[in-house]
Every structure is written in structure tokens, then in C-alpha cells.
Image (cartoon, helix red, strand yellow):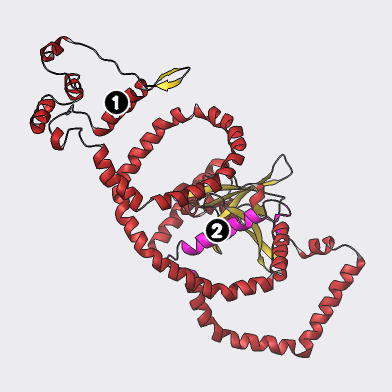
Amino acid sequence: MRIIGNAAKVVNGATASIASRIGWSQRAIGGFLILAAFFGVMFALYNKERISNIASRMFTDTATIEAEFPRAYKLRDHKSDVKVGGVIVGSTTDGRPSGDGTYIVTMQVDGSIRDKLGSEPSASIRPTLLLGGNYYVDLEPGGAGEYDGGRIPLARTSVPVELDRVLDAVGGDEAKAGIRASIRQMDRVLENGGSRSIRGLVKNAPATLDPATDVLLGVRGTRPNRDLTDLVSGMHATGKVLTARSGQLQEIITSLRASTRSLRAGSRPLAESVGTLPETLRVTRAGLADLRPTLRKLTDTASEFRPVATELDEMLAKLEPVLRPTLGLLKDLKPTLEQAKPLVRRLVPATSKATGVASDVKGPVLNRVEGPISDTVLSPWSGQGRYAGGGASGNRMYVELGYLFSRGADALSWNDGSGGHSRLAAGIAPNSISGLGQPLTMRRYLELVGALPPGSARQNDQRSGK
């Protein structure tokens, strides 16, 4: 009370001072101040939303968001709320027409809301009540990224469609008569037990709320703050893709109808295939079981084959420049191969017969050729028996036989008018002088010319007693 008294004294003193200066009575000055205070309070009450927004912008963290709507729709500056998920997060602060016939709405929201809007938020004007009343802006998060602060475009905004516009869109008296008939039928349904059914639904609804709560909690997923939001964002993106091109969804449905029609036409073969599927799976399982050891071995050898494959890759890389010039040759070779096809066809029977001959030769014949015959032909040439030690020239038997046939052919190559005959020539060399005092027999001559080993003639004479 002392404070109030002191304040009254101060006001009275100030009033008296002002009255003495301007020549008014103290009562007139008091009435004017009371009137000014009344209008100030009324102005503050009328603009409390504007004042609240200005104070919030000055003392708290706020963000400004703009959205472009098709037209101005019953929003009031600083009075229409902005909501996200039904929660008020700010209010509209300004609305102005753009130069393109649209309407730009500026909103002031809490600063923390920007992080929850996503990269592609949308905005819609909704009524507070079913039949109208106050309107607010509903922000819906969208997109997987972060909001960049840009204006929400016209493609992601909408205004409510009121009943009068729906009725205006319904053309013709028949359509309107049909709507009136539907309303009358609804009234009859409610009169004939429909209202009782609705009351029963309302009565039984609380019992279903607890299970519905569990279902809704399950829909939230394991991450309540993200799973449902991601699901809605994914469904939104899916719907956006399906409706991106006009008629695309209709084409998908038409294609699906054609596919189901084809499945219905081939239902019997499909049923037979499904009926044989268990047996097919059983055979496949058995085949896979048989294939398991091979795969195990392949797994064991794969690690060893890897270095070889690496080297093979390098070899193929080096081989490619070499093979590239041969492409022209292969192209030229193709006509030749086409012409060789008849020859190959004729060679097939001959190859079959040759296979039979090779089968006959294989066995004892080849074993004999590879055994005694090859050993004899490849053995070193040397005399045996009475000629042991003679004729050893270091050549093998087939070489000496070659010399024999060559020299025999040379000796038998003489021909004249009487026919063919052989030639035999005798010659005297310096080393033959030592043998002039002895009788020159044929064996002695062969010894001298080297056809017989040295001393073989003397041994023969001793054995014969000469």
C-alpha cells in the first residue's frame, strides 16, 4: 500500500507539473492519460500475436519459411497458426500476391523445426473444424535430405476444396439429382437401423482401441523417431513416381490386367508345372548332392589355380596384339572351310575304317614291332660268330642296310639293249702290293677291299688245312 501511495503521489506531481506547463487543469490531464492508457492496452490486446512474434524473433531461435499457394485463402497475418503433425510450431506473418497469379505466405516457426522438414517439405491450408472456421498451414516433412531454407514451390502446396466448389464441379442436373438421392438414401439407412449400428460401433470401439494401440506401436518400428517417418517418405516418393507422368499408373494397371489375363489363359500348364515342381526339386537336390564333392575339390584347387589364372591373364593380354592381325586371315579362311566340308564328309568313312585298321594293328603287331624288330633294327652293326669283331663301324643296323641298298641299286643300274646287268670293278691300291706273293682268292680280295675283316682269309685257310 505504501508503494501504491508513493506511485499516486508521483503521478499527481507529474500531472500537476504538466498542467502548469500547458495550462490544462489537473483533472483534464488525468483523464487524457487514462484514455491514452486504455487505447494502448486495447492496441496491445488486438496485436498481441504480432507483438508475440516480434518478441520471439528477438529473444528466441526462430526460422522463416515461405510457401507459394495457388491463391490467397483465408489466412490472417500473425493470427493463423502453423502446425507440424497437429502441433503448433509458429504462425503466419505475411501474405502477398506474386506476379504470376499465385500467393506467397511467409511463416515464422521454431528454429528446431527446420531440421525435421526434410529436403522436400510440402504445405497445405486446412480448416480447424470440419465445416470451416479458422484456417492454419500444415507443414508435412518430405525427402531424405535437409531443408535448405528455400521457398516451398507451388507443386508441393494445396488449398482445401470446399463443398460449394465440389458442387460447382459436378456438371448437369442429373448428377446433382443423384447426389440428392444419395443423401436421401443415407437418411433412410440411418432410420432403418443404421443409427443403431453406428451406436453399436461406437460402443464396441473402445474395446478395439487397446489392440489398435499395439498395432500402431508396432507400426512405429524399432526406431520410433525414424522408421515411420522413413516409411511415409518412401510411400510419398513411390506415389510421386507413380503419378509423375499422366496416365502412367493407368498403363501399369492395364499391363497388370494383361499379365493376369495371360496367367489365367495358361493356368493349366502353370498348374502342371507347379505339380511337377516337387519332383524337379528332388532331382535337383540329388544332383546338387552329387555335385558337392566336385565343388569341394574345385574349392581346394581354386587357390592353387589363382596364380596360374593371373599369369594366363597376362599372357592373353600379350597374345591379343598377335591374334588381332589374324582376323583377316580367319575371314579369308572361312570360304576355304566351306569348300572343305565335302572333303571332310568323305573323310569320315575313311577315318572310321582307319580306326578299325588301327584297332587291328594295335596289340600283338605293335608289341612285336616295338620289341624284337625295333631292338634289332636299332642295334649297333657288328659281326657275329666267325665274323665277331669285324665290320663294327659304329653305325646302327638300319644305317648299314641303307648303305647296302644304295650301293646295290648303284651296281644294278646298268642297262643296254640286251637288258639290265650288274657291274663289278677290280682295282689295285698301294696296300694291295703286299699280297702279290700269295694266291688272290675271292675271300682274300674281299678282305683287301674291306668287305671282310682282316685275317679272316688266313683263318679260313688254316681251318681248311692249306
**Mark found first going from the N terminus, 2 or 1:** 2
Which dot marks residue 234? 2
- Secondary structure of the residue carrying numbered label 1: helix
Residue found at the far top of this picture: 430
Residue at point 59% right, 45% down? 151
Residue 232, quarter of picture: bottom right
Q: Nearer the viewer, residue 234 or 76?
A: 234
Which residue is under mark 1? 403
Q: Specify few, some or many for label 1: CA neighbours under 10 Å numbering under 14, 14-19, or 20 or more.
A: few
Q: Is residue 410 left or right of residue 58?
A: left
Does residue 319 belong to the magenta stretch? Answer: no
- Magenta span of residues: 220-249
Q: Secondary structure at mark 2?
A: helix
Magenta span has 244? yes
Position of 197 relative to 277 (above/below): below
Looking at numbered disc 2 in the image, what kind of residue is underneath it? Gly
The x and y percentages for residue 229 are 51, 61
User: Residue 438, image x and y in percent?
Assistant: 11, 17
On screen, residue 145 versus residue 169, left or right, reads: left
Q: Position of residue 148 (x, y in %)?
A: 51, 44
